[in-house]
Amino acid sequence: MTGVPLFIFDDTCVLCSAVTRFVLRHERDHVIRFIGLRSHEGRVLAARYHIDVDDPTTFLFVEGNMAFSRSDGVLALALHLRWPARAVGLVRFVPRVARDWLYDWVARHRYRLFGQVAQCVAPDAASRHRFSLPDMP
């Protein structure tokens, strides 16, 4: 794995793309790499962590040799945000079973609630080098 944190996300999910833009705006150190699941690199990582690329039920946040998914992924990602966005980390005090139930519910219904696109909206020029997306020149 690389030394930088990796945010592996469903690149056809409108909600996931919105979360990616939110992280870009609120990230403290601007070190996270963003990897679309349908990119070559995303497919390799999805296979390694047993994620179905055609029906992903979670995103992954990989840091060092640790991979976090579902609500634990949200908490690990939150540590890289500035305040007040970092306050999302307060959900760590909610029992994991409840956090993951809510996460799974949103994940199951995300396309219906937020929509789906054929491919991820391209990042702006300043952030483009931090992304790995399918068919990205």
Image (cartoon, rainbow, N blue to C red):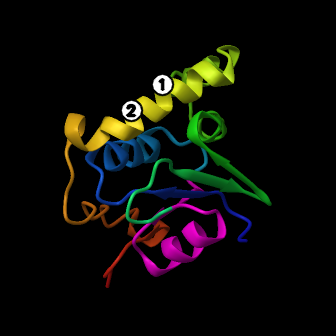
- Specify the quadrant that holds the N terminus: bottom right
Q: Is residue 86 visible?
A: no
Q: Nearer the viewer, residue 91 or 107?
A: 107
Q: Is residue 22 above or below residue 133?
A: above
Where does residue 108 sit, x and y in percent of width and height?
A: 37, 39
Q: In the drawing, what numbered circle is on residue 81?
A: none
Q: Is residue 76 visible?
A: yes
Answer left or right for 69 relative to 84.
right
Where does residue 12 sit, x and y in percent of width and height?
A: 29, 58
- Residue pictured at 59% horizontal, 33% vertical: 71
Residue designated by label 2: 106
| Residue at the right extreme of this rendering | 65
Given contact means CB atoms under 8 Å apart, are the residues at marks 2 and 1 in contact? yes
- Specify the quadrant that holds the C terminus: bottom left
| Residue at the bottom extreme of this rendering | 137
- Residue pictured at 54% horizontal, 61% vertical: 51
Q: Amino acid at mark 2?
A: Val
Helix, strand or loop for disc 1: helix
Residue designated by label 1: 102
Quadrant for residue 110, please give it.
top left
Answer left or right for 94 relative to 131.
right
